[in-house]
Image (tube, rainbow, N blue to C red):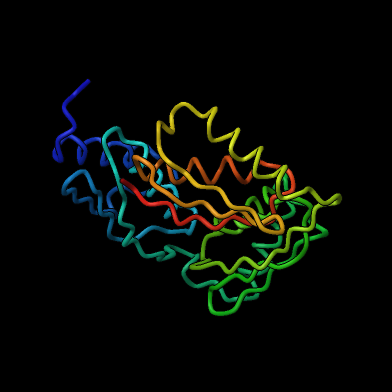
Amino acid sequence: MHATTDEWIKREVVEHLAWDPDVDGARVAVTVAGARVRLSGSVPTVAARRRAVLDAAVVHGVVDVDDRLEVRPEGPAADLDDELLQASSLAALREAPTVPYHGVGVTVRGQTALVEGTVACLEHRVRAEEAVAGVPGIESIVNRVRVVPPEPVADEEIEQQVRGHLERHARLGPQAVEVDVERGRVRLRGKVATRLGQFECQELVELVPGVTGVVSVLQVA
């Protein structure tokens, strides 16, 4: 294992960005100080921005990622009007395998996509946003999709399952994560070792049946 100096971390982050087909690494500037990575520059889509942050977060030794990236569509996508962007966003929702198309709609104003509707689980809400995030020309997303489980799940049961998921996930390490549940909404508090740990905690919670939302105020230790 290499020593995780700031220089080594920067080289690894730059390499991860260069190998990611969804990110143009040449448009992203990387600086590292105290194992904290700052990303600046531009990316073509909302999805590419999220990928760039994740590419940096997965590098060994990184404790946090400061996202200063801007979404700047390039090529023909830069000139698409809201009507065409809306049609492309609806097409992306139809093609997403885990999104119930008839329950979710999208409108676009000023390159901002407003995603609305009702779904049965939080994962569908997340996947709907991810589908629109990949549409070239969309610069930001507002997700107002409501989660209405077909059968209600008690908060106590949700909390037990969330705690079980977090405890079984060995990669998250011995962090202290507090879990509170109210009407299906999960609140995570405490500290994790890395920014990647923040992402993983939230993803684990999103898979728990009955969860209607996640509020994460986890801090990187």
Residue at 46 percent across and 69 percent down: it is: 78
Q: Residue at x 47, y 26 (%)?
A: 170
Between 110 and 161, the one lying in front of the other is 161
Residue shown at 25% from the left, 54% from the top: 38
Work out whether residue 198 or residue 94 is closer to the camera in this orientation and state it: 198
Q: Residue furthest right?
A: 151
In the rendering, at what x and y percent does residue 188 appear? 51, 51
Q: Nearer the viewer, residue 43 or 161?
A: 161
- Give the quarter of the figure containing the N terminus: top left
**Dividing the picture into quarters, in which one does residue 4 lie?**
top left
| Residue 188 sits above or below residue 14 on the image | below
Quadrant of residue 221 in the image?
top left
Is 74 left, or right, of 100 in this rendering?
Answer: left
Q: Position of residue 163 (x, y in %)?
A: 58, 38
Is residue 92 among what the camera can see? no
Q: Is residue 178 visible?
A: yes
Image location of residue 101, percent across then percent down: 78, 56
Q: Is residue 113 left or right of residue 219?
A: right
Image height of 124 relative to 118, above or below: above
